[in-house]
Amino acid sequence: MSVEAREARQPWILLSPALTAVGLLLFVPLIFIVVYSFWLRTASGADQVGFFLDNWQEALTDRFYRDILISTLRIAAITTLVCALMGYPAAYFIARSRGNKAILLLMLMLPFWISYIIRTMSWINILGVSGALNTFLMWTGLVSEPIQMLYNEPTVILGLVHFLLPFMILNVYVSLDGIDMTLEEAATSLGANRWEAFLQVTLPLSLPGLAAGGLLCFVLGAGTYITPLVLGGPSDAMFANLVFEAIITQLNWPLGSALSLMLLAVLGLLVAIYNRYLGMAQLMKGLG
Amino acid sequence: MRSTSGLGWHLIRGWALLVYVFMFLPVAVVVLLSFNDSQFGSFPMTGLSFRWFVELWENEAILRAFETSIVLCLLTSIISTTLGVLASLALVRYRVPGANAISTLLIAPILVPEVVLAVALLLFLNFLGIHKSFALLLFGHVIFTLPFVILVVQARLVSIRREIEEAAMSLGANPVQTFFQITLPLMLPAVLAGALFAFTISFDDITGTLFWKPGGVETIPTQIFAMLRNSISPEINALGTVMIVMTVGLPLLGVAVARRLAQRSGG
Amino acid sequence: MTDKMDTTTRLERLRERYMNGDLDRRGFLGLIGAAGLAYGVQTPFARHALAANVSQVRFDGWGGVVSEAFRKYAFDPYTKQTGIEVVDGTFGGGDEYLSRVKASPTGEYNIAHLSGVFDYARYHNLGLSSELNEANIPNLKYVIPKLVDVFRAVTDGKLSCVPYDYGTTGIAYNRKHVSDDEMKEKGAKILIDERLKDKISGWGDWRTRIWFGALQTDQDPNNATDMDAVWDAIRQHRDLSLKYWGSGAELMSLLAEEEIYVTEGWSGRIYALQEQGHDIGYMDPPNGYGWQECLFVIKGSPMEPCEELLNFMLAPETSIAVAEGQNYPPALDPQKVDLGKKIPTLPAFDPTGKLAGLTFADPGYWNGHEAEWSKTFGRVQKGY
């Protein structure tokens, strides 16, 4: 066998386990979902087999779904932005600190030992009317009446940020850690002030991590359904709630399938754009 | 070390401290409540007590679920990290036709709402006539933790210069040696981060686990979920506290002991 | 178990050969992989084969105190007597469980602790009901007849389940902010009282919302004629509400932390709060919402072992232990069985065993509208 042929085969050998797993356990099962999306749920609860476009027509034309999809994307975008603003400096601190980095990173993952539901529900003890913050504010005399802080869109975002921030920080950290610190120092010695050196050297080099973290935050944020249930008010629902309700509460798998394929399409499109313009190939060119 | 001094650095350190405080708020609540005397956790605490730790120790169901969770997460994180590292290497180090598309495909598991993935996989198994098993649960977890590993490892790999690997090869190392001696150590932080992601995501997963678990298999989150209707037992808070003490306390203790020993031998 | 032993010994032998140098490393790893794969594929079939000669029965229910009580008082004695193992699983809610059952092969799930009549009728409509041989469940004679009759009506006089416990969804209120007198005067309408804006909550469940919507518009909850008025009441409640709750744990923390002053609540959960010393009142308004839970046997299950297990679970000591754990009275008739000290103090408990004061949902009426109403509520809930 020629060297080129072996060279060409190697990546596929490396890729095959992951591709097989995702293909067999995600894409083949998704075929069922595609098929289901053309069935129809009858009033009695049973599914009618056939080729109906009703679910798709409903999912695509009804303003209800479009509105919630847009607000879901908006919430995910805000969450991602907040995560980036909060997470980048923290990641920078970990990467450049002289302390024990492993412990700093491990500490970041600690909240995950407390199950998601409990973590989310425990905000009531912090931000609730008789929670820690209100008690503190009343004690200092800053307010005389407890402030109602929970159960609105900002608290949904707060819950999401708390869940997603570690992903952002770890991704950025991993990138920053790979950057040679002397580069920044070289830039400062060439007359740039530290801020300029950061902007021109460190930030561009850490973009892959920031982009990967951002993508994770956005996609996970857009697919969440428990946070809005626990931390949102009556009308703070996200798209995954609709999918969950259709599939679980209403047992309307055909409609739920159409809705989830719609979400998959929108998020998939965003990832494709990311891969095209911000993705690895693009970043490599920038670095090369 | 010029970069770790000055006003900018102090601001960054202060900011990072705030971020940690934010991350720890709910953790603090849970840890405090695990010492609460009364059953339905709420402040102000009625009294200090270790009874939930004692009851946790005697609660077989929760301990068994904890064991299952740990085994499941460890296996998930090993398999997922291995698959993820291999795939990332292929995507970053080789010229693969359609690399962008493949990248998107491999991230797809987190684009599908989990409940849909859960139902779809069950339908597929049903179609094949295969019953649920622990292996299925494990593979399910591998699927949705894979994207986390791939994203973080790829991001690190891009920033490792190809020239270093090429230099090793030109010095006579074969590709496998190069990988284990040069590339792997360089991307180790990302591999560990990926493994940590996979572990925690798997540890925290509810939806998929609910659908895929075979009879008699419960994880900590499914146990909690099943308690929601009545009330979550404070033993769960106690378990969280124990885990936190173990994950932070032991390494910190190790570091402290090492430092003490180093001081003694140095002084 | 035999499969596992085989695999283990096979691996052990392989390792020896590897240590002796008979096998190169690649061959060794490959064989281990193959063995692991074979084990992984084999297990599900082995499980299936076991199910054929009934060595185990699968039960699914709520976790925590409930499953602990079942394990101790019913499952362990049952296994001791019959040799059949009870594999217990848990779920987070009835809807989620039904989705799982629907997506799994018949026979995978056997007995489940379901919310009474609705789910019973739903499972029946989906062709998932079975037919119990009541002669095998002698303890059924202790059960309150009214609870059994509701089920018989759905399945033509036969039973696919046994009733297990009952409770009400009434109105819970913080006595510091809402007086008993005000509650008596306003009843269900307190939940749409402008004065309490943002201090109101409710369960985000379409049936409960429609039931209380009917009460708020003075209609019969089992036969509302003016649905537009009901939906308006639901919207009004939504606009005044701080949030919807989704679980008993959440209901309790919202009330205990004084985030809200009034909400509907499950009787057992409010009782647990009162037990803890919180000054929370509980009232079942006229035509209040009564419900019951049952132990349902799913089609395709081994019937005789299941019936025997049901008998163990219905035994007074098991019933009482479960009831005291979750604070809902058992389905046993207090006229026939001594229920101990605590149960008579539980809300919704009826010492006469007639349950004349409770209104249960009419399954035909509710399930007939399920598809339409659950979907409409999904929208109304989100502000549409």
Image (spheres, coloured by chain):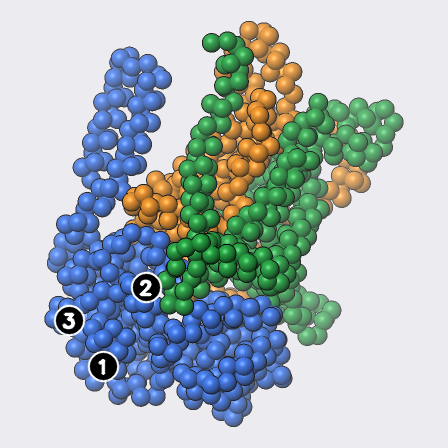
SS at badge 1:
helix
Q: Chain B is drawn in which colour?
A: orange
Above-or-below relation of C204 to B235: below
Disc nearer the start of the sequence (1/2): 2
| Chain A: colour as depicted | green
* B193 or B81, nearer to the observer: B81
In the displayed structure, does residue A156 sit left or right of residue C130? right
Q: Which residue is drawn at 26% across and 54% down?
A: C106
Instruction: Report if the CB atoms under discs 3 and 1 are less than 8 Å apart.
Output: no
**Sequence-first disc among 2 and 3:** 2
Mark 2 lies on residue: C126
Q: In the image, C124: left or right of C198?
A: left
Q: Which of B240 and A54 is in front in this view?
A: A54
For numbered disc 2, what is the local secondary structure? loop
Q: Mark 2 lies on which chain?
A: C
Foreground disc of the pair 2, 3 = 2
